[in-house]
Image: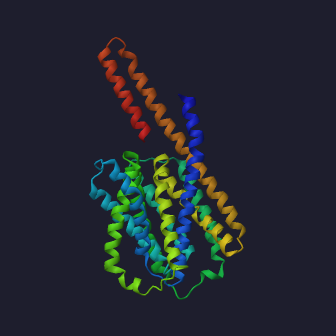
Amino acid sequence: MDAETKAKDAWRLPLVLFLGQLVAFSMASASFASSFLANLGVNAPLTQSFFAYLLLTLIYVPILLHRRQKPRIPWYWYLALAFVDVQGNYLVVKAYQYSSITSVTLLDCWTVVWVIILTWYALGTRYSFWQFLGAGTCVAGLGLVLLSDAKSPDEQDPGRIPLLGDALVIAGTVCFAFSNVAEEYCVKKNDRVELIGMLGLFGLLVSAIQIFIFERKSLEAVAWSPTMVISLFAGYAVALLMFYTITPFVLKMSGSTLFNLSLLTSDMWAVAIRLLIYRQQINWLYYVAFAVVAIGLIVYSLNESSSADGRATGTEAAAQYQQLPSDDNSTSSSNLDSKEKKQLEEAYIC
């Protein structure tokens, strides 16, 4: 049993890190599409999210209808989750109108802090010193990226309102933290397809209502061009489709904290896109930052696995200790067996 568990952990860690980097790459692609649209003067963050939720609805809702099963979670919880998620997307995308990519990336790191606080109090997750060290290492690595970006002359734009953009990002990180923790709870307790399908459906409804109320005039002012604006909207929607599809796997296999730590590398993926598309030179600090973030992710992941193994081993040992004095009583033995299974299941869920 121990050998089988170690074998599963051996492939689980690289798989989680790989999926986390796919999520970070999709997030970087969505960020570039948003910043490009903002540079073109397009101010329609709700419309960008609308097309992403539309793709989720068209793909996953038919699967739910084909199953003909009643949702495992009440619809109003999915509505609340979608509302918070839409607001988070709106606030962060809106921030590109006022602040630079560097500032948005810097303040987006606070999602990790909010998630650690929420999972500590809401889900009862406990973190070791090494897990905090891994999280801090990831944030320090991203700080190197921001230090390099701060030296760029393109970051100085007097026509923007950075304080307003910073406030929007901070509010957006709070929304994303609530959304990530809620998604982690739903995906570990219920079905992944149901989560994505209902999130897409209710996100579509919420964003459509808010577009009708707040964004009609902005859409009328957009100069629609198939080669530029429409392709950027489509690229943003496809990137978020990839993001929402892979996210439940990462949340189920690791948790919302490691998920958000993986998103910190999206800035490095954004640099890779800039290098390939715009042929811009990359500061050497970016390569150091990527290595630091990778080390932080590995430190956090290894200690997350070891702490989970420790809880499982301790629970199993306690169950075996309780079995010893009840060899002659078959009834109490069966009761202890059921308790042992229940404890092991609870330890596996945690």
| Colour basis | rainbow
Q: Quadrant of residue 265?
A: bottom right
Residue at image point 34% right, 11% down: 328
Q: Determine which quarter of the picture holds residue 90.
A: bottom left
Residue 30, given in percent of the width and then of the height, sits at 52, 68
Q: Position of residue 24 (x, y in %)?
A: 55, 61
Horizontal arrangement in the rendering, residue 128 relative to residue 321 (left or right): right
Q: Is residue 174 visible?
A: no
Q: Which residue is at the front of the view, 191 or 328? A: 191
Which quadrant of the figure contains the C terminus?
top left
Q: Is residue 341 above or below residue 132?
A: above
Q: Residue furthest top?
A: 328
Q: Residue at x 58, y 35 (%)?
A: 7
Image coordinates for residue 260, horizontal then vertical, percent:
50, 58
Q: Is residue 12 left or right of residue 277?
A: left
The answer to whether residue 300 is above or below residue 8 is below
Q: Is residue 83 visible?
A: yes
- On the image, the x and y values in percent for residue 205 come to 32, 67
Q: Residue at x 60, y 83 (%)?
A: 156
Query: What's the residue at 43%, 87% (across, down)?
Result: 221
Residue 342: name its quadrant.
Answer: top left
Nearest the eye: 321 or 99: 99
Q: Count the marks: how many? A: 0
